[in-house]
Amino acid sequence: MTAARTLPGHPHIVRTGDALHVEGLSLAALAAEHGTPLFVYSKQWMLDALAAYQRGFQGRDALVCYAMKANSSLGVLRVFAEAGCGFDIVSGGELVRVLAAGADPAKVIFSGVGKTRAEMRQALAAGIACFNVESDAELEVLNAVALEEGHRAAVSIRINPNVDPKTHPYISTGLKGNKFGVAHDHALATYRHAASLPGLRVLGIDCHIGSQITEASPYLDALERVLDLVEAIEDAGIPLHHLDFGGGLGIDYNNDTPPTADALWKQLLARLDARGFGGRRLIVEPGRSLVGNAGVCVTEVLYTKPGEDKNFCIVDAAMNDLPRPAMYQAFHQIVPVASTRSALPVTYDVVGPICESGDWIGRDRELSVASGDLLAVLSAGAYCMAMASNYNTRGRAAEVLVSGDRATLIRRRETLEDQLLTERFAAA
Ligand code: LLP
């Protein structure tokens, strides 16, 4: 019997003998049962990731609000709802989903630059904890909607601290050129405005500087900037009940070394304590770091194709399933599901069947593969299924949640009937 060994950086993915497993289950067996492309998630990885935050906040008044945009599948939301998590939502659709998964609305916060009146009404009726407001114009509208509905809406104002998170430009959000939040210099005026509106109750302050952040320093810079503002706002007679530092903590895609959640928060809490804010209620909105490395996408090799400049390994997953490489030139490790070599190693671009040169999943990867082999695309738990599309009339993949040696199909594969359901021909 060959010893089991975990993949570096992926403690819940285990190679036993010839076969790759997520927790106790073989990916080849799951693919045979459910087909490919197939997303497979480890429940234990998610719970361990959450535990790192909980350890970091031990003894503090803190709420982890899972940013469900990272993976909003009901079966994944249920894992976090059962663990007592709060949620960060960005649409009325996400609100319906998370309530369907059993979330406590009193632990839901609502972020985003473009909330509609209908979404505001829906969230007020559900009794969410707080709106993270991003502009003066939004404050006015929320005030009017709350008064119409006979509510006082709890608000926190998102500050743009103008801090460089040192990540991909598409996923940095706290620079002054980004559309997010209220400029640091304007924030006090916005707080005064909010405090004067009768339909609002000012509850907190928030900021979110970006995503896939792999260093503590941008967080520490943002923290100082936010605390400077908290002092100024409270000096102006507006007390703040909570401080929300957003999400953004990165994961290991390719030998990345982000701090663990508890190590990051040890540093941040030390600064909060030093400045006298350690006892304040804290909120965080992590997405990727709670689900990213819980997931893999299993895909079958359809063809290998030698080219003049490049060799191509054409697989049955594509940019509609795994959009991150096409959108952000993101790197995902790609490993064979069976370790026995079925061909000589060749350097391939791993690509999908979609009719675009942007449809690639990995570039210049050395693989020993032949048609019919299975590959696992790692770190596919966050921003993959949640961003999947039907481009090229491809159905969305199926998803399986593994817990120990039990698998649950949490989303069946989307059929063509599902896709055609909403469409009609024009009248003749
Ligand atoms: N809070 C707010 C207000 C956000 O905008 C985001 C993410 C989060 C929390 C969660 O951030 P996280 O902990 O997941 O980094 N699709 C991109 C990532 C977009 C992130 C958008 N905002 C990607 O695949 O890299």
Image: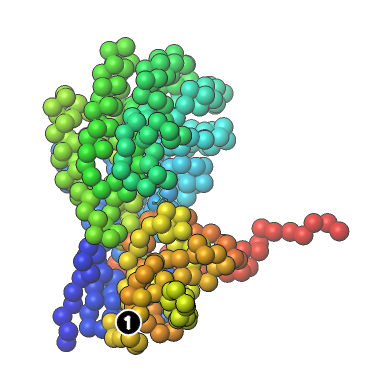
Question: Which residue is at the front of the view, 276 or 59?
Answer: 276
Q: Is residue 29 visible?
A: no
Which residue is at 18% across, 77% downward?
4
Q: Quadrant of residue 75?
A: bottom left
Q: Circle 1: is it few (<14), some (14-19), or many (20+) Cα within 10 Å?
A: few
Q: Is residue 258 above or below residue 418?
A: above
Residue underneath mark 1: 345
Report the residue at 26% width, 69% height from top: 13
Secondary structure at badge 1 equals loop
Horizontal relation, residue 138 to residue 83: left or right:
right
As rendered, which of 123 and 18 lies closer to the eye?
A: 18
Direction from residue 20 to residue 77 in the image, left or right: right
Residue 367 can be seen, yes or no:
yes
Which residue in the rendered view is the most extreme toward the front?
308
Percent x, y for residue 415?
A: 58, 69
Picture coordinates of residue 204 (x, y %)? 33, 26
